[in-house]
Amino acid sequence: MDTTNTQTTLPEGTNAAVTSLFAIENLIKTHIAHIETVKTELGKQAEMFNDVLNNDTDYKKAADEGKEVNKKKAEAKQNVLKSPSNASLNQKIKDMRQELKELKGALSNYLQQYQKIADTDQIETEDGEVRQIQYSAHLIKLTGKFSK
């Protein structure tokens, strides 16, 4: 495990906002490193547990039976989907799920714009209910995905 300190130190008399920004940046870096450490350890523990399960004869038998049942279930579903009306209904459900995903994405963008313009994290809906705008930020590695 790499325990190198990646925190940035600032000179005396640095602006409070800049100091706060660097403090948050250091917290983010520390948490990212800790998350990666926990992920690695979790992977090791999960692998050990899976080995234990796979070496247990009762579990292995039940898992194999489960796979067979799932296979039969998938075959039965395919037989049901051979009917044009059932296939059409299934496609309609998929399309509606995709539309819902797109609508939620657009709503998220609108809420961000609203929050910036109105300078508030609350909005009243048409039914009179006040709702709070809440975000969940996460990081995505750009290295490898968008190599320049």
Image: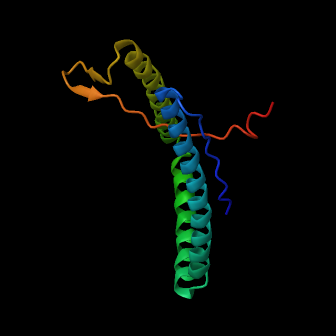
Q: Residue furthest left?
A: 128
Name the residue rendered at 60%, 76% in the picture.
Answer: 48
Counting every numbered tag in the picture gives 0
**x and y percentages locating residue 126 in the rendered image:** 23, 18
User: Residue 57: x percent and y percent?
Assistant: 57, 87
Q: Is residue 47 toward the left or the right of residue 111 in the image?
A: right
Relative placement, left or right, of 40 versus 13 is right
Residue pushed farthest top? 117
Which quarter shows the C terminus? top right
Of residues 34 and 13, the one drawn nearer to the viewer in this rendering: 13
What colour-coding does the image apply?
rainbow
Q: Which residue is pictured at 76% across the width and 40% down the height?
A: 144
Q: Would you identify the image quadrant in which residue 128 lies?
A: top left
Tell me the residue at 51%/50% (across/down): 80
In this view of the protein, which residue sits in the foreground, 90 or 23? 23
Q: Is residue 8 above or below residue 4?
A: above
144 sits left or right of 112 in the view? right
| Above/below status of 111 relative to 95 | above
Q: Nearer the viewer, residue 144 or 21?
A: 21
User: Which quadrant is the N terminus positioned in?
Assistant: bottom right
Q: State the residue at coordinates (62%, 71%).
A: 47
Determine the image quadrant of residue 143.
top right
Q: Residue reaching furthest bottom?
A: 57
- Tell me if 99 is positioned left or right of 121 in this view: right
Measured as percent of width and height from the top left, residue 116 is found at 41, 17
Outermost residue to the right: 148
Give the percent coordinates (x, y) of residue 111: 40, 22
